[in-house]
Amino acid sequence: MPNSNSSRVTLAPSDRAWSEVTNTGESAYRIRLEGPFGPSWISSLCAELADRQISIDRAHAMRTLNQTWVAELNVIALPGAEDPLSIQYVELAEAGAPDASDPLRLDRYTIEETPAHGGTLMLTIEAADSLGLLGSLLSQLAMLFLFPIEMHIETRNGRAYDSFWLGTVGATSPGPRIRDSLDRVLARARANR
């Protein structure tokens, strides 16, 4: 296992995207990314990390005014995980939207209209934390053409407490039909628990 001073920075040659990963303790890593990623980049990254047995403990990601994303993820490498220092994070972020077939299970959720980011839906969820939860949720949102403009992810005592500010492609404010569709998807996820 790498020591706490181990880190690696990767620059993508075709654009301004970059990633940096630092070992912050036993099996713990901080991943920082920045770049002009597409709308489903975060769902792709989260699903790919889960496939590699890497669990997201805390994260914050936000799209800036110039449409560049800035993200920091604190992750835990589970037993059998790929070495986080050897993963090409920019490539995972650009892999495309993952399959949304994983079942989604939520304990609670709220949806609020907010003026943040020019008009977004603020979604907050609470659920038992599980590997792949975030990727599954983001994939379900992408199927509704809803994408995070900002997100805060936190895991405490085995529970996920996550907040998302959601917009549509082109950052337009989601209308009532999209909100109703989102409510139906999340109500099913709550019934699955």
Image (cartoon, grey):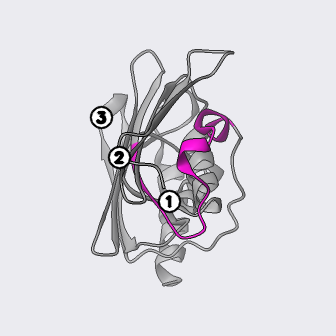
Task: Look at the image and say whether residue 151 sits in the magenta stretch.
Answer: no
User: Which numbered dot is residue 134?
Assistant: 1
The disc, 1 or 2, on the residue closer to the chain's N-terminal end is 2
Residue 179 relative to residue 94: left or right? left
Quadrant of the image occupied by residue 6: top left
Say if residue 175 shows up in the picture: yes
**Residue 96, image x, y percentages:** 71, 41
Q: Helix, strand or loop at disc 3? A: helix
- Distance from the alpha carbon under mark 3 to that under mark 1: 22 Å
Instruction: Give the residue type that dot 2 points to.
Output: Ser
Task: In the rendered view, tell whether residue 44 sits above or below residue 19.
Answer: below
Type of amino acid under label 3: Ala
The label nearer to you, 1 versus 2, is 2
Instruction: Identify the magenta region.
Output: 73-94
Q: Nearer the viewer, residue 173 or 161?
A: 161
Quarter of image, res 57: bottom left
Please report the residue visible at 69 percent of the width from the left and 15 percent of the height from the top.
14
Q: Is residue 34 left or right of residue 142?
A: left
Identify residue for label 3.
Answer: 116
Which residue is painted at 48% across and 56% down in the image?
A: 1
Count all numbered tags in the image, as a single digit. Answer: 3
To which residue does mark 2 refer?
A: 4
Q: Residue 116: x, y in percent?
A: 29, 34
Q: Position of residue 152 (x, y in %)?
A: 33, 48
Give the mark nearer the N terminus: 3 vs 2: 2
